[in-house]
Image (cartoon, helix red, strand yellow):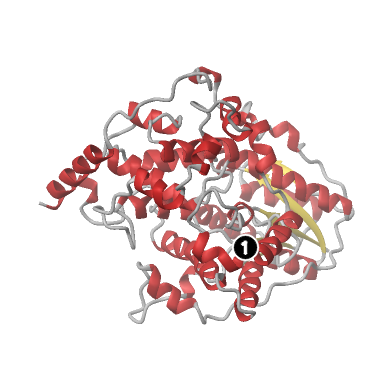
Amino acid sequence: MVSIWWIRRDFRLGDNPALVVAVKAGQVLPVFIRDAQLDALGAAPKWRLGLGLDHLIRRIEGLGGQVVLRQGSAAEELLHLVKETGATGVFWNRLYDKAAIARDTEVKATLTEAGINAQSSNAHLLFEPWTVSTKAGGYYKVYSPYWKAVRAHPVPEPLPVPDADWAEARLESAKLEDWHLGADMKRGAEVVLPHCHIGEERALTRLDDFLQDHVQSYKARRDFPAEPVCSGLSENLTYGEISPRTVWFAGWRALEEGAQGAEHFLKELVWREFAYHLLYHEPDLPEQNHREGWDRFPWRADNADAENWRRGRTGVRFVDAAMRELYVTGVMHNRARMIVASYLTKHLLTDWRVGRKWFEDCLIDWDPASNAKGWQWVAGCGPDAAPYFRIFNPDGQAVKFDRDGEYQRRWIAEGQAAPPSTALSFFDAVPRAWGLSADQPYPAPEQTLKAGRDRALEVYSRLKG
């Protein structure tokens, strides 16, 4: 008998519940479907997904299997494959955003009606969103009590790589290179590629290196963007190249062995869980203000200031350094993400959805829950939000977390006699239409930070009134 493993964001063989179930059910046929949800991805996440998928395809081919690639409606393509192969079951790991839930509901109904065993599993999260609730039976809207609730919540041990019997039949399949998933990256792909850590093997190495070299200092030094203290695992978690359970148990082992920063590392992993908890219960979180009354806030639509922000040309060095890091590496340090988001939404009074959309296009670790939650948190309109009057001062943050300017020099070439390659790479990655070069003078800010802060507070006071 043939069983279909429908691959989505689980590009791994270890701790993969859907794969384990498929192995038990028969010969495994791995399938990936390019559908409307993949096509809706921004340039960087779509390209990075393609890289991860290519790595998984090569790994499975090395084991004697075939990953079948199809394009179209997931429900229709899976039903076609069932008829082609005589498969008795289709197995996948759940996703939790609104579009994925709607698609998966349709798939399950279509296959069940055809008499096919359609079964989904949890592989993307530690805690299913509906399994954690307040004493009143609702969902958590504040992180701290959520952390307390799940800290001792049972988590199943990670599953080993199963001994799969791969389906022998070779089916018609699209060629991944013909999908051109990296087309929108254009010349930026060559710049960003060296900063990617692709595949399950590199993800596991990344985790081991972090726990061996950096977890001790993680809590104390994680906010310093020039220091390589963070794990970088958000990239791999996004595409399921490592499971959150693998990270969870490794983090707990480090904590029990006395690693001082391990608990804070685990809290950051649970911050991701909390974002999905919210997204599941508030499926419109990526588009709608969470807090009541914020629809009346006079956000600016996209504007020339926001365009300078996107291009790393605000004249505020910490902000520009972070935006250039994003364009060169596809990621941005977490402290820097908060600073650039605060600057856009507060100093520039620009709608948080403008920033959210840019991150969706540029982040290789883009995550629908974390991105939406993070932007609303900083903007002041989200669950468990930072108060609106908490306005990050980029210059003050630079003094605190980049006192010697190493991070800013790493990413801003203008004004340096011998700029580092990291800073120069920005000009190799940006669209030629932007007309940017390292020889141009560095811009002056359009307004003082104090003026931007005062304006934001004035607008907020009118909203409250």
Q: Amino acid at mark 1?
A: His
Q: Is residue 138 above or below residue 430?
A: below
Q: Which residue is mark 1?
A: 214
Q: Is residue 232 above or below residue 277?
A: above
Residue 16 visible in image:
yes
As drawn, is 129 to the left or to the right of 239?
left
Q: Estimate the x, y position of residue 153 in percent, counting from the top left.
A: 52, 80
Q: Residue at x 69, y 68 (%)?
A: 17
Looking at the image, residue 6 sits to the left or right of residue 129; the answer is right
The residue lying at 30 percent from left, 28 percent from top is 446
Q: Residue furthest left?
A: 465
Q: Residue at x 35, y 74 (%)?
A: 138
Label 1: element kind: loop
Query: Residue 286 in the image: x percent, y percent?
Result: 40, 49
Q: Nearer the viewer, residue 232 or 149?
A: 232
Establish if 227 lies above or below 360.
Answer: below
Neighbours of disc 1 within 10 Å: few (<14), some (14-19), many (20+):
many
Residue 40 visible here: no
How far across and how far down the image is residue 110, in percent?
60, 56
In front: 307, or 69?
307
Q: Position of residue 53 (x, y in %)?
A: 72, 46
Q: Is residue 71 left or right of residue 2?
A: left
- In terms of image quadrants, where is residue 430? top right
